[in-house]
Each structure stands twice: as structure tokens, then as C-alpha cells.
Image (cartoon, grey):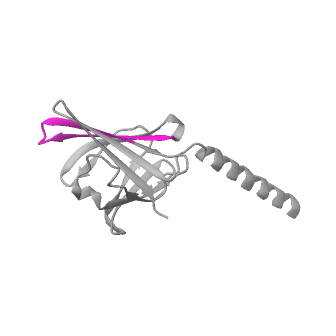
């Protein structure tokens, strides 16, 4: 019986490993610490230029912690990558809806944030995140639509080693 149990345990372990790899096959290598490349980024305000990101993925939850000189700033932002819009506090005192989704077979993350400026004008911010196949460069293209105006910000990050 001991041998059968060991074989069964080994088989379950192998299937679990195989299933884990299948589940994460094709998903971008986004986890880790990312340093903003301000020189190659576009339209980035000075207040963001010294902020780096630490990203962790747990299932469909994407945790993003802002870092200043390596130290955490505030609480991590949690984005559930299931396409469902959720009401929550977006910034201190500002409520809004946030939705996140995997696109392009795990090669793109789309985040959509909807708020109201001065509780009147709708603001829609769409952020598309990609990581190069080698996992070394992350690009965040952020488009904001407000009162008929469109602003775009491109943030390039390099993986910290």
C-alpha cells in the first residue's frame, strides 16, 4: 500500500505542476520590482518620476505597491483581473469604478478607471500594460479622457535585478 500511495502522491504532484504551468502559460512575466525609465517615458509628471513599482500576482489579483527609494508608499493597489467593474476609493476622497482584464492571451493587462472630476465631469482612464517576452521591459500606456480631451502618458519600466 505504501508504494501505491507514493505513486498516487507523485502523480497528483506532477499533474498539479503541469496544471500550474498550463494556467500560467502565455502570461506575461510581470511579477517583480520595476524601475521607471524616465528618460524614455513620455508625459510623466515630476511627482511620478521617482516612484518605482513592485508587482505581485496571486491568482487573478494583481498587487501593485508604489516604492520611493525602495520603501513602500501607502497600501498596495489590488486589481482583480476578471473584467468586473468594482466601486471603491480610487484616491483619497475620490470614489470611482475600476475594472481589470487579461487580453491577448495573457500578453496585455487592461485597467479602466472611471471617476467624476468635481463630481460632475466623467473621467475615464485606460491603462494598457505589456511586458517584453524576455521580461525586462514593462510599458504602461495610460490614456485619460476628460471633457472631450484626450491625454496620453507612456511609462517605460526596467526590471530591477
Residue for point 33% across, 49% down:
41
In which quadrant of the rendered view does residue 150 lie?
top left
Would residue 2 appear left or right of 96 to someone viewing this image? right
Among all residues in the image, which is located at the extreme top?
Answer: 148
Q: Image height check: is 25 above or below 58?
A: above
Asked if residue 111 lies in the magenta stretch, the reply is yes
Point out the stretch of residues depicted in magenta.
107-128
Instruction: Locate residue 129: give its quadrant.
Output: top left
For this rendering, which residue is in front, 27 or 100?
A: 27
In the picture, the quarter occupied by the N terminus is bottom right
Magenta residue check for 53: no
- The vertical placement of 91 against 107, above or below, is below
Residue that protrudes farthest toward the front in the picture:
39
Q: How far across and down, in percent of the image, does residue 92 sit?
A: 20, 55
Position of residue 68 in the picture relative to residue 130 (left or right)? left
Going by the image, does 94 lie left or right of 157?
Answer: left
Residue 68 shows in the view: yes
Percent across and percent down for residue 65 are 37, 60
Q: Nearer the viewer, residue 101 or 129?
A: 129
Whether residue 1 is visible here, answered yes or no, is: no
Query: Which secondary structure type mostly characterizes the magenta part of the structure?
Result: strand
Amino acid at each position: 500500500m505504501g508504494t501505491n500511495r507514493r505513486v498516487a502522491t507523485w502523480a497528483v504532484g506532477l499533474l498539479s505542476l503541469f496544471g500550474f504551468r498550463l494556467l500560467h502559460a502565455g502570461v506575461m512575466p510581470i511579477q517583480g520590482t520595476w524601475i521607471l525609465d524616465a528618460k524614455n517615458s513620455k508625459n510623466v509628471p515630476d511627482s511620478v518620476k521617482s516612484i518605482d513599482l513592485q508587482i505581485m500576482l496571486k491568482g487573478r489579483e494583481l498587487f501593485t505597491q508604489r516604492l520611493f527609494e525602495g520603501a513602500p508608499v501607502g497600501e498596495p493597489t489590488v486589481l482583480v483581473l476578471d473584467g468586473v467593474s468594482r466601486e471603491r476609493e480610487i484616491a483619497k476622497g475620490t470614489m470611482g469604478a475600476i475594472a481589470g482584464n487579461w487580453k491577448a492571451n495573457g500578453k496585455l493587462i487592461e485597467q479602466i478607471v472611471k471617476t467624476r472630476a468635481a463630481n460632475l465631469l466623467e473621467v475615464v482612464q485606460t491603462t494598457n500594460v505589456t511586458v517584453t517576452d524576455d521580461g525586462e521591459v514593462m510599458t504602461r500606456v495610460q490614456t485619460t479622457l476628460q471633457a472631450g480631451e484626450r491625454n496620453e502618458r507612456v511609462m517605460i519600466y526596467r526590471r530591477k535585478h
